Every structure is written in C-alpha cells, then in structure tokens.
Image (spheres, rainbow, N blue to C red):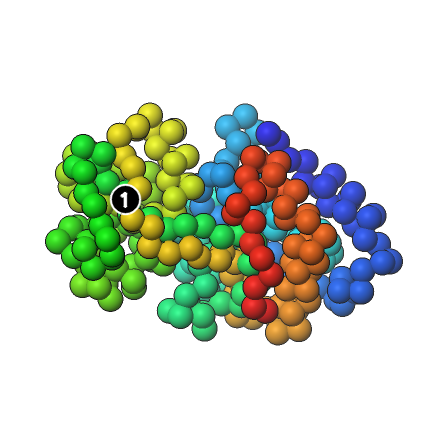
C-alpha cells in the first residue's frame, strides 16, 4: 500500500477549505519534520516505494493537511534517537509516543491518535504465569532504550536490558539472554510474524496506553490547542476510525483524551 501524500493533502484541503473554524488559525512558523520508528502496523517503510506508511502516518498526515501545515519529511529512525531529536530540534514531532509523567514536560502533546497494550512476552515452552507485575521480579526483562515500560518495571525492582531496536529482543529471548520481553502487543505480533517466530506469547498485560504525537516545546500553546481541536474533530467524525478500519483494526481507536 503506497500513500500519495501530496494528493491526499490536496483532497483534504479542498474538503475543509472555508468551512473549518478550527483550521483557520495560522500554522507553525516552519514545515514540520516528523519522526517515527519501524513499528507496523502504525508505521513502517514500504519496500517498493521507500515511503513511510502506516496507521499513525495516515492519521498525522491527515491531521496536518486539515490544519494546513506542511510536512517537510516523515522519517523512520531509532526510537531513542527520535525522542532526542524531537526534544532538541524546533518544528519536529515524534509519532506514537506514550504520554508518561517522565516525558510530560519534555514535549508538546497532540492526540491521542491511538492506544496500545503493553505486555510481557515469554517462550511458550517456559509456561511462565504472572499474576501481577511483582511476579516478574526474578526475571531479566528486555525492552528498547527509553521505552515507557522502563520506569514502571524499575519501580517494581525488575531488572531491565535495553536495546536500540525491538526486533533484537525476540532472538535474545529465544537464546535465553533475557527472560521476558516488554513491548507493545500489536507491533510485537507483527515483528514475530516478520521474523518467522511462532513460539513466543504474551503472558501478562501491563497497561493500556494512549499514544500521542509529541512535538518540540517550541510549538506555541495556541498551535497545540488548535491541533488538538483537529484531532477531536477527526475522532468525532470517525476519520480515525476509518483509517484504523482500513488496516483491519477497530479496538485500538482512541477516545478523545485530555488536551
């Protein structure tokens, strides 16, 4: 599936021209650079075209088109690097970021644009049963650098092993270099399918997390409020439902969250 982003933007702008009060305010000073990670079905690089596509990409591109904001580029880069660049670079945003207490003051928040379940995965043959997160204390848990699960795990005195890419964790788990894998459930299933791994399973769901577009703090508060208004309109008119449904999902659609 290849998305013709310029054509999509033109269609949406024609549809909302003159009729969207939320979109009437002026846009940010410069074109936005968008970062995301290889995280199907929310974002990935199309092998034939090289374009960045996925549920989150479609949602954010439509959001920016409705708000008449130019997108300079949409790049897939490692998660921790994306967060670092976004927090330190003006007119930059990172897609699908969990809004945690540790991150709250680092970014401006637009959304929610989705929600996902964070779970612990284990080899099926290990028959690990966890009744609570405290039960994971004897185990070494693998995750990615700056993952939102890390503060939660460490608060329970659970040892954590961090890597740059989540795709490294399933092989580590099979080789017993880690005991559990903390990750977002739906993207994890895509990773396992892509790697051809069938004998890992979720054994404990830690949390359901709303996901946001996190932007650099230089974005004016008024602009953040305007974009959040557009997101609410997209939730209300079922545009976000339509995008999720186009990829075969419906339970991950967010409800309107805090501004």
The percent coordinates of residue 234 (x first, y second) are: 68, 54
Any part of residue 94 in sight = no
Against 11, residue 136 (above or below) is below
Of 242 and 57, the residue lying toward us: 242
Of 73 and 252, the residue lying toward us: 252
- Could you tell me which quadrant the N terminus lies in? top right
Any part of residue 104 in sight = yes
Where is mark 1, residue-wise? 203
Residue that lies at the very extreme toward the front in this rendered image = 131
Residue that lies at the very extreme toward the left in this rendered image = 138
- Could you tell me which quadrant the C terminus lies in? bottom right
Q: Is residue 157 left or right of residue 166?
A: left
The percent coordinates of residue 86 (x first, y second) are: 48, 60
On the image, which quarter does residue 179 sit in? top left
Q: Secondary structure at mark 1?
A: strand
Residue shown at the point (66%, 73%) measured from the top left: 222
Of 125 and 229, the residue lying toward us: 125
């Amino acid at each position: 599936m290849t998305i013709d982003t310029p054509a999509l933007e033109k269609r949406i702008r024609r549809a909302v021209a003159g009729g969207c009060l939320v979109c009437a305010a002026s846009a940010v000073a410069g074109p936005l650079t968008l970062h995301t990670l290889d995280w199907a079905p929310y974002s990935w690089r199309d092998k034939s075209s090289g374009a960045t596509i996925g549920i989150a990409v479609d949602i954010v591109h439509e959001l920016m088109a409705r708000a008449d904001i130019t997108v300079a580029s949409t790049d897939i880069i490692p998660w921790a690097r994306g967060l670092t660049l976004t927090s330190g670079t003006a007119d930059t945003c990172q897609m699908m970021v969990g809004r945690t207490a540790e991150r709250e003051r680092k970014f401006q928040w637009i959304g929610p644009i989705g929600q996902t379940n964070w779970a612990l995965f284990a080899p099926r043959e290990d028959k690990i049963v966890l009744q609570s997160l405290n039960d994971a204390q004897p185990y070494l848990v693998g995750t990615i650098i700056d993952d939102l699960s890390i503060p939660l795990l460490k608060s329970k005195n659970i040892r954590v092993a961090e890597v740059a890419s989540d795709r490294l964790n399933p092989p580590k788990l099979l080789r017993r270099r880690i005991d559990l894998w903390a990750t977002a459930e739906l993207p994890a299933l895509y990773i396992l399918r892509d790697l051809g791994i069938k004998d890992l399973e979720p054994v404990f769901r830690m949390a359901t997390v709303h996901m946001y577009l996190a932007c650099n703090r230089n974005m004016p508060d008024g602009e953040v409020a305007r974009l959040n208004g557009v997101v609410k309109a997209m939730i209300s008119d079922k545009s976000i439902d339509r995008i999720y449904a186009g990829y075969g999902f419906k339970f991950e659609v967010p409800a309107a969250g805090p501004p």
